[in-house]
């Protein structure tokens, strides 16, 4: 049976040694001292390892069932959801006006990580609710906020996002769901949505669906899309629940992974809905959810890699296979443990260096979101906008790859369900697809984000990398700064290629977009490792008692810089080959 221990010590390192959270001038960060965050993370870790992790395999094996129009969740989910609600875990960073605790988004991110590692499918029920809460909080009327938010904050009511239809995924301008205006100001919503995570379940009294639809007579395409609040049960003026709305579950999808989460086909048959935000401005409101969700999915990518890594390390230390080529390291036993072998070490170091780098990047992104929202910092908003497709796309690609590598450590046992490693790979695979498939993230990065505000945010990023390298004259930092400088120059050369060749043939840019996203992911993690190495050396120079922790951190970072940043040269060569090799065949020749 797999096990999980929250990586609290490493989370604390990122919050305090790296980000120096309590020293930031962002409102609310002064509360985030080491003792406070340690206490919160310890309790979150207990809930994750003692309650959520044991339910992970149960959710995978049992899945969800549709009975008489109601989705039944796996055994134990309901009770665990009650514990999560009672502990206030669903309300950490929500507005105190609606029952939230008002903590920074960074703290919520740090708490969510162990929940996702322990049981990703379960945590999606409250994670999606948080996204729906954020959209209503940002775009709803005072009346809508008062009516829906308090019970969404507490997760007495949960939330969903409804975008995809059978004939349209990314191209939302093709949607057919209609919203007919009524005399009382409401709308009648009719259509079908698919792939709706947590679309129905038995753990909440009501489900608040946010549904994209077109108001007849509006603009064509994406400009005619509006967003509507469509509750499962109508909410009366006094807050009590009224009649069942005309929304139903058509079916529950059979999926490769995340079996414990209900992925539903939702049918809207003249359901009562309420316009959220302005008419025909639905994408603006929905992107409040989408951007938060994309960062959350980036977290899912490395959080699944984290639990897979923990179990792979334990197996590699325990499983006896062969002898070390340099001489027996377990002479009393019949063989040495797997971990003595260099290729197993390579495999585990890939996992460890990725997970720790991705954690740092995700938390830095969360800190930028807080800076943008709590301090109205436009530069922070521009930077996190640039980073969002990288955090989502790169981290989920690599998260799945690392979960698969963890599976490989087990050999044949990794392929056998009872050992649990298969589930991590299967669950991680969806992260590369939902909330915008990773090819779309790459197109968003290259096609929109690089040029945003005249390219000022990507130039600021390059300047930040340059200044980081300049700050560290210490000879000990050369393995970090030299590698980061080189990779950053290659990333800039790729951007220059797009500028020089993309205008005359846009395919020259788009056929290299995936490589660019991957390159930028490596540079971002290289930046994080440079900062973490500097923080670790500072701690050692300051007489830190836990020298092994900081020395391990530095060695892990050196591995990433030496073994992963060189991939940037390969990606640059691919980009500079242009569109011709990619577009050479006609459609008939495939």
Image (tube, helix red, strand yellow):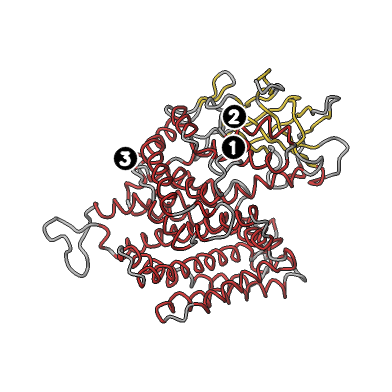
Q: Residues within 10 Å of mark 3 (few under 14, many from 20)?
A: few
Sooner in the amino-acid sequence: mark 2 or mark 3: 3
Question: Within 10 angstroms of label 1, few (less than 14), some, or many (20 or more) residues?
Answer: many
Spot occupied by residue 348 in the image (x, y as percentages of width and height): 36, 59
63, above or below 432, in the image: above
Earlier-in-chain disc, 1 versus 3: 3
Image point (47%, 70%), residue name: 530
Specify whether 237 is left or right of 462.
Answer: right
Q: Quadrant of residue 556?
A: bottom left
The percent coordinates of residue 66 (x first, y second) are 54, 24
* SS for callout 1: helix
Q: Residue furthest right?
A: 217
Q: CA distance from mark 1 to mark 3?
A: 30 Å
Evaluate if marks 1 and 2 touch, with contact meaning CB atoms under 8 Å apart: yes
Q: Which residue is mark 1?
A: 129
Name the residue carrying label 3: 1
The mark closer to the camera, 1 or 3, is 1
Disc 2 crowd, CA 10 A, few/some/many (<14, 14-19, 20+): many
* Numbered label attached to residue 157: 2
């Amino acid at each position: 049976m797999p096990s999980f221990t929250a990586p609290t010590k490493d989370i604390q390192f990122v919050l305090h040694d790296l980000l120096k959270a309590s020293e930031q001038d962002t409102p609310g960060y002064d509360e985030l001292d080491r003792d406070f965050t340690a206490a919160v993370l310890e309790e979150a870790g207990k809930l994750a390892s003692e309650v959520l992790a044991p339910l992970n395999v149960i959710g995978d094996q049992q899945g969800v069932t549709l009975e008489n129009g109601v989705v039944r969740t796996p055994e134990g989910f309901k009770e665990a959801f009650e514990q999560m609600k009672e502990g206030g875990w669903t309300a950490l960073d929500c507005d105190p006006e609606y029952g939230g605790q008002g903590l920074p988004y960074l703290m919520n991110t740090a708490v969510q990580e162990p929940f996702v590692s322990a049981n990703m499918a379960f945590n999606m029920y409250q994670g999606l609710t948080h996204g729906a809460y954020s959209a209503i909080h940002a775009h709803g009327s005072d009346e809508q906020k008062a009516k829906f938010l308090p019970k969404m904050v507490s997760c007495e009511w949960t939330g969903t996002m409804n975008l995809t239809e059978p004939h349209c995924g990314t191209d939302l301008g093709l949607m057919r769901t209609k919203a007919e205006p009524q005399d009382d100001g409401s709308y009648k919503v009719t259509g079908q949505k698919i792939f709706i995570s947590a679309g129905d379940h038995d753990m909440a009294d009501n489900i608040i669906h946010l549904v994209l639809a077109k108001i007849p007579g509006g603009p064509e395409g994406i400009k005619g899309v509006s967003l509507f609040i469509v509750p499962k049960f109508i909410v009366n003026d006094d807050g009590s629940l009224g009649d069942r709305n005309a929304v139903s579950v058509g079916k529950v999808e059979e999926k490769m992974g995340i079996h414990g989460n209900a992925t539903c086909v939702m049918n809207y048959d003249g359901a009562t809905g309420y316009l959220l935000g302005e008419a025909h401005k639905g994408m603006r409101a929905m992107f409040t959810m989408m951007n938060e969700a994309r960062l959350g999915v980036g977290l899912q990518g490395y959080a699944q890699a984290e639990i897979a890594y923990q179990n792979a390390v334990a197996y590699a230390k325990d499983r006896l296979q062969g002898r070390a080529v340099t001489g027996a390291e377990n002479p009393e036993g019949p063989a040495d443990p797997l971990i003595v072998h260099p290729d197993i070490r390579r495999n585990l170091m890939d996992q460890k260096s990725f997970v720790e780098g991705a954690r740092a990047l995700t938390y830095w992104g969360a800190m930028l979101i807080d800076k943008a929202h709590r301090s109205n910092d436009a530069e922070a908003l521009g930077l996190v906008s640039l980073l969002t497709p990288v955090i989502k796309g790169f981290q989920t690609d690599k998260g799945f790859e690392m979960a698969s590598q963890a599976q490989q450590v087990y050999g044949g046992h990794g392929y056998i369900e009872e050992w649990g490693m298969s589930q991590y790979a299967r669950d991680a695979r969806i992260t590369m697809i939902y909330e915008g498939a990773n090819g779309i993230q790459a197109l968003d990065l290259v096609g929109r984000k690089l040029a945003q505000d005249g390219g000022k945010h990507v130039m600021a990023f390059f300047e930040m990398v340059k200044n980081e390298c300049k700050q560290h004259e210490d000879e000990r930092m050369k393995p970090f700064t030299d590698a980061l400088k080189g990779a950053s120059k290659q990333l800039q050369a790729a951007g220059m290629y797009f500028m020089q060749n993309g205008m005359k043939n846009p395919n020259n840019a788009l056929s290299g977009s995936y490589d660019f996203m991957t390159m930028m992911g490596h540079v971002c993690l290289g930046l994080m490792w440079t900062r973490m190495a500097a923080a670790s050396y500072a701690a050692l120079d300051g007489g830190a008692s836990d020298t092994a922790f900081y020395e391990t951190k530095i060695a892990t970072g050196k591995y990433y810089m030496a073994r992963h940043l060189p991939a940037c040269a390969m990606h640059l060569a691919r980009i500079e080959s242009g569109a011709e090799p990619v577009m050479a065949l006609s459609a008939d020749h495939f």
